[in-house]
Image: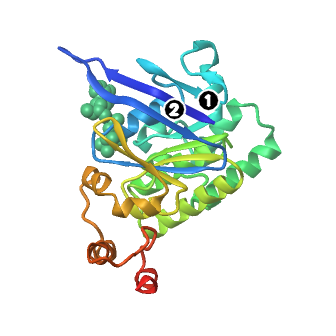
Amino acid sequence: MIEFSDVTYEYPAAERGITALAGVSLTLAPGEHVAVLGANGSGKSTLVRLANGLLRPASGSVIVDGDDTRDAAGVWDIRSRVGVVFQNADNQIVATTVEEDVAFGPENLGVPVPEMRRRVDGALAAVGLTGLESREPHQLSGGQKQRLAIAGVLALEPDYLVLDEPTSMLDLQGRADVLAAVEMQREAGRGILHVTHHLADAASADRVIVLDAGRIVFDAPPAGLLSDKSALAALGVALPPIGRLAAELRARGVSVPYEAMSAESVAAAL
Ligand SMILES: Nc1ncnc2c1ncn2[C@@H]1O[C@H](COP(=O)(O)OP(=O)(O)OP(=O)(O)O)[C@@H](O)[C@H]1O
Ligand SMILES: [Mg+2]
């Protein structure tokens, strides 16, 4: 379990600090997929950097399976258990070929060669990069680099996967591939924290967290999101047509369940 308890984080600034997160408490259990949504600057990437100990909370605590990220001695161990795909894929490329790049992490963990082959091949297949093993990473497109960064973390087989907008540069097929790979990780018992700008990505999560100016304004299963006005306001999104219809019907006294998010389920309530 990753547990954030009343976490506050401030970036140092010239005159006064920038409070990026304030009083954030949340949990991520093994086998759980939690999506994180929020506007630009709401604190999503800060949350990601706190999850693996890259940043330490100013107050409150982040505990990973019993280990506090503020204990400097354990931070490398925590980083091997919490695999992070950072927002900028370019900064994560470390080797001169695609294959070596994916192998880099497991190599450092001392994974034996036959097992390494399996992990590298599996990770590249999961993100649709099979066949590009000997390419130089800088020759890849932006979306391919993003896939490479994801493969690198999949090959680590960490207990928790933390993904910061991993599909922002991917086309529809690419997003579907990555979401399927993430779903397989969840089924394998890994906890997934998935920062995304796509509301649709959050629909398959067990829980959705919405950040607004460093505070959690929503933490519940996705079914409730499209009828939560303050969460939607924080995201700057309008209610989708079917949600609007459901809200109008409710206002007229028709009892439409909050989970009803398809035309069929709204019709069934009539
Ligand atoms: N390295 C930094 N130094 C100073 N302030 C920072 C730094 N990184 C982020 N911030 C500030 O902290 C706040 C939260 O930033 P963060 O990157 O966590 O937001 P985000 O939700 O990931 O945004 P985006 O959707 O643009 O990726 C913002 O006000 C941002 O300007
Ligand atoms: Mg960010």
| Local secondary structure at mark 1 | strand
Task: Determine if residue 262 is in view.
Answer: yes
How many numbered marks does the figure carry? 2
Residue at image x 44%, y 21%? 57
User: Percent x, y for residue 29?
Assistant: 62, 43
Give the residue at mark 2.
51
Q: Which residue lies furthest to the front in this view?
A: 253
Q: What residue type is labelled 1?
A: Val
Please indicate whether residue 155 sits to the left or right of residue 166 in the image. Answer: right
Q: Residue furthest left?
A: 15
**Residue 263 occupies quadrant:** bottom left
Q: Which amino acid does label 2 sit on?
A: Ala
Q: Quick check: which quadrant has ligand 1?
A: top left
Residue at image x 26%, y 77%? 252
Q: Estimate how packed mark 2 is, as few (under 14), some (14 to 19) or many (20 or more) residues with alpha carbons within 10 Å.
A: many
Give the residue at mark 1.
64
| Local secondary structure at mark 2 | helix
Q: Estimate how packed mark 1 is, as few (under 14), some (14 to 19) or many (20 or more) residues with alpha carbons within 10 Å.
A: many
Please indicate whether residue 41 sits to the left or right of residue 45 in the image. Answer: left
User: Percent x, y for residue 226?
Assistant: 36, 63
Please indicate whether residue 231 sits to the left or right of residue 141 in the image. Answer: left
User: Percent x, y for residue 33?
Assistant: 57, 52
Residue at image x 61%, y 50%? 32
Task: Determine if residue 56 is in view.
Answer: no
Quarter of the image that includes the N terminus: top right
